[in-house]
Amino acid sequence: MNELDLTNIQAVIFIVVAIGLLIYLNHLDRQKSARIERESTQTTETSSEDLSSDYGRYIQLGMVSKGD
């Protein structure tokens, strides 16, 4: 570590702080991934009983020809 002109103690402290920062960033990333996973499993599909009777009618209307 001659480029930074650090003593041995400063180099050790720098490495420990850098490793601690990497561990902290990894922890944040794992929390974010776990939160996204929880949110994706909580979303459930709507059952057909909750849908109105007109649901999907726009698809049927789109298939009707315009009388070419």
Image: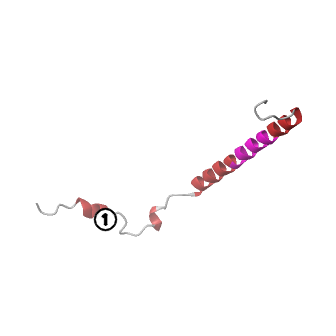
**Relative to 21, 41 lies left or right:** left
- The image quarter in which residue 43 lies: bottom right
- The image quarter in which residue 62 lies: bottom left
| Image quadrant where one finds the C terminus | bottom left
Q: Nearer the viewer, residue 48 or 12?
A: 12
What residue appears at the point 17 percent right and 60 percent down from the top-left corner? 65
**Relative to 44, 59 lies left or right:** left
Identity, as a three-letter code, of the amino acid under mark 1:
Tyr
Find the magenta span and give its range.
17-28
The residue that mark 1 highlights is 58
Q: Is residue 27 depicted above or below 50 in this figure?
A: above
Q: Is residue 63 depicted above or below 54 in this figure?
A: above
Q: Secondary structure at mark 1?
A: helix
Q: Nearer the viewer, residue 64 or 12?
A: 12
Residue at the outermost right position: 9
Residue at the outermost left position: 68
25 within the magenta span: yes
| Image quadrant where one finds the N terminus | top right
Q: Residues within 10 Å of mark 1 (few under 14, many from 20)?
A: few
What residue appears at the point 69 percent right and 50 percent down from the top-left corner? 31
What residue appears at the point 37 percent right and 69 percent down from the top-left corner? 53
- The image quarter in which residue 52 lies: bottom left
Q: Nearer the viewer, residue 67 or 28?
A: 28
Name the chief secondary structure element in magenta. Answer: helix
Which percent across, then down, holds residue 47? Answer: 48, 61
Residue at the outermost top position: 2
Which percent across, then down, holds residue 19? Answer: 77, 39
